[in-house]
Image (tube, rainbow, N blue to C red):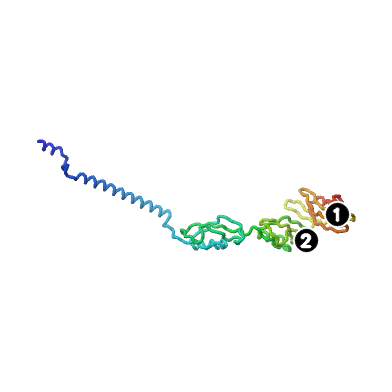
């Protein structure tokens, strides 16, 4: 009777406990689960790899950074492009050993292997910190200005005077040609206004008057201090201050705004005063 009751309570398809079928079924189910998770993981990796490949493309090949130091920047840029690299200028520095506009150094350095398409950072030379003043005497003012600019110099004070030379021709320069100056220094110019030059109108409508003053030093002390100044609106300028001998004739080119006063002094005593 007990045997019959057990057989009635046993679920359909159930085996006796001494048979190891239930353990094998559990192991099989567990293994199947792990395999499924593994497949899902592989699929996710494949999708991620595919996305990265689509975004960045395949790994770029290795190339060698060529030597471009000492080359003009344009030539260096072209040389790097041939090597499948790109040049980026990151700084300009003074360097007396590398010509202005040429490459001083690169990063990565020459000979290093990098991926194609990489940026190569370059430092470009400004040339030497000092330059020689070029000769501009005899040139026209526009030509002289261009030559000074090309030598990294600037025009300083520009004075004009009546002269037989054509108008705007440079009569003299200070400092003279060959002088060594720092870059961006100023060179003062004396410019011809032509034979009949006497006035010059500025852009704001103001007029400047130009005169040549001749002074004969009177008899007296062996050496006399002669000074010539022009004082006017926004101007107080000395055109001469030096020791002269009696009988010496001093010629002074001066200018000033219309109506400015010219004063001549001998040993601090005023001897002449007149408006321009």
x, y percent for residue 93: 59, 56
First in sequence, mark 1 or 2: give its number.
2
Left-right relation of 167 to 10: right
Please tell me whether mark 1 sits on a helix, a strand or a loop. Answer: strand
Q: Residues within 10 Å of mark 1 (few under 14, many from 20)?
A: some
Quarter residue 90 falls in: bottom right
x, y percent for residue 219: 90, 56
x, y percent for residue 74: 56, 61
Q: Identify the mark at residue 224; answer none if there is no mark.
A: 1
x, y percent for residue 32: 26, 48
Compared to 63, does 5 lie above or below? above
Q: Nearer the viewer, residue 242 or 6?
A: 242
Q: Which residue is identified by label 2?
A: 194
Q: Residues within 10 Å of mark 2 (few under 14, many from 20)?
A: some
Left-right relation of 112 to 275: left
Compared to 9, does 219 lie above or below? below
Q: Identify the mark at residue 268; answer none if there is no mark.
A: none
Residue furthest to the left: 1
Please tell me whether mark 2 sits on a helix, a strand or a loop. Answer: loop
On-image quarter of the N terminus: top left
Quarter residue 61 falls in: bottom left
Residue at 29%, 48% (x, y): give it.
Answer: 34
Compared to 6, does 225 lie above or below? below
């Amino acid at each position: 009777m007990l045997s019959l009751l057990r057989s009635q309570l046993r679920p359909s398809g159930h085996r006796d406990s001494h048979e190891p079928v239930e353990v094998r079924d559990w192991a099989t189910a567990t293994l199947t689960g792990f395999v499924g998770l593994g497949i899902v993981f592989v699929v996710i990796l494949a999708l991620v790899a595919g996305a990265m490949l689509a975004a960045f493309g395949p790994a770029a090949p290795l190339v060698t950074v060529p030597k471009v130091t000492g080359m003009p920047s344009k030539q260096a840029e072209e040389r790097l492009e041939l090597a499948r690299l790109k040049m980026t200028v990151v700084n300009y520095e003074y360097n007396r050993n590398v010509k202005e506009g040429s490459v001083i150094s690169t990063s990565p350095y020459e000979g290093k292997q990098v991926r194609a398409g990489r940026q190569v950072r370059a430092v470009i030379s400004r040339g030497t910190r000092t330059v020689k003043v070029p000769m501009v005497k005899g040139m026209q003012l526009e030509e002289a200005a261009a030559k000074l600019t090309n030598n990294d110099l600037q025009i300083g004070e520009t004075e004009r005077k009546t002269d037989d030379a054509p108008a705007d021709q440079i009569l003299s320069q200070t400092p003279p040609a060959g002088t060594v100056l720092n870059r961006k220094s100023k060179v003062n110019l004396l410019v011809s206004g032509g034979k009949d030059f006497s006035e010059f109108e500025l852009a704001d409508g103001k007029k400047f008057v130009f005169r040549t003053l001749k002074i004969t030093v009177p008899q007296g002390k062996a050496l006399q201090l002669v000074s010539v100044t022009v004082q006017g609106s926004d101007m107080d300028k000395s055109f001469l201050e030096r020791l002269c001998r009696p009988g010496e004739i001093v010629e002074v080119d001066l200018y000033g705004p219309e109506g400015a006063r010219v004063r001549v002094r001998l040993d601090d005593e005023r001897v002449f005063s007149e408006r321009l």
